[in-house]
Each structure stands twice: as structure tokens, then as C-alpha cells.
Image: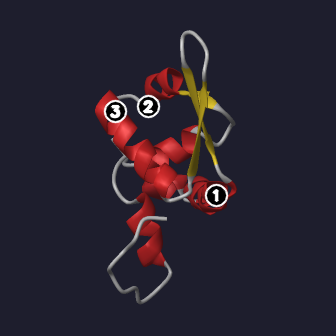
Amino acid sequence: MTTRNQPYNDGLGPVFEIIGGKWKGVILWELSDGHVRFGALQRRIAGISEKMLIQQLREMEADGLVHREVFHQVPPRVEYSVTPLGASLNAPLCEWGKKNLDRTVKKG
């Protein structure tokens, strides 16, 4: 897990430290259905650049949320999946989102 030098007063600090930002929650959700190849993951997430996706996946792998599996074949193939730790974080966040969708979606 990535070393953090920040003290926390509650349980939310570590959660936001690990999945804070625009993309990590979306990536975690997209991986919740099982193994996904890098290209497919990039197509599923509109607006994310290849560089940003690689960076976010590396950080999430270092934090133990995502598993990366390399298949040594021609052409090379890489698949990502959510770890049990990532799934344990994903479930309550998604449940909260579903429960409060009508309150969180901006009316336009």
C-alpha cells in the first residue's frame, strides 16, 4: 500500500486518499463485473486519456484495489480486475449512489 504521511481524524480520510479524484471511483466501478482488458476499459470510460488511465491503474494497483495480469502472448494482453479490498470499497459507495441518485443528479 502507498505510504501516507497525513493523520486522519475519521474513516473517511483514508477512503478519499485512496479513491479521491475524478477517475478512480469510475475505474473501480467498471472493473466490478470482472476482468477487463486495458483497451476495453479505456473505451468504457469516456474522456479519460491513456496516460491518465495508466497512472490511475498503477496507483490503484499499488494501493491493492486492482489486480493487473499480464498474458505473455503475441500480441501481449493485459487484464485488470478488482481485488477483494477494492470490491469491499466499491460495494458501499455504489449502494449509496443508487439509494441517493435522485438527490445527487443535477436537474437540467
Which residue lies at the image location 43% right of the left edge and 63% below the top edge?
18
Residue at label 3? 48
Dot 2 amino acid type? Ile
* Residue 59, percent from left and from top: 41, 52
Q: CA distance from mark 3 to mark 2?
A: 6 Å
Quadrant in which residue 48 is drawn: top left
| Residue 14 in the figure: left or right of residue 5 | right
* Residue 62, percent from left and from top: 47, 55
Q: Label 3 near label 1: C-beta < 8 Å?
A: no
Residue at label 2? 45
Which marked residue is nearer to the observer: mark 1 or mark 2? 2
Q: Rate crowding at label 3 as few (under 14), some (14 to 19) or many (20 or more) other CA atoms within 10 Å.
A: some
Q: CA distance from mark 1 to mark 2?
A: 20 Å
Tag 1's secondary structure? Answer: helix
Check the image and name the residue furthest to the top. Answer: 74
| Residue nearer the viewer, 56 or 13 | 56
| Residue 40 in the figure: left or right of residue 108 | right
Quadrant in which the C terminus is drawn = top left
Seen in the picture, residue 63 relative to 12 is either above or below; the reply is above
Which residue lies at the image location 65% right of the left edge and 51% below the top edge?
83
Q: Is residue 15 visible?
A: yes
Q: How is the image coloured?
A: secondary structure
Dot 3 amino acid type? Ile
Residue at label 1? 95
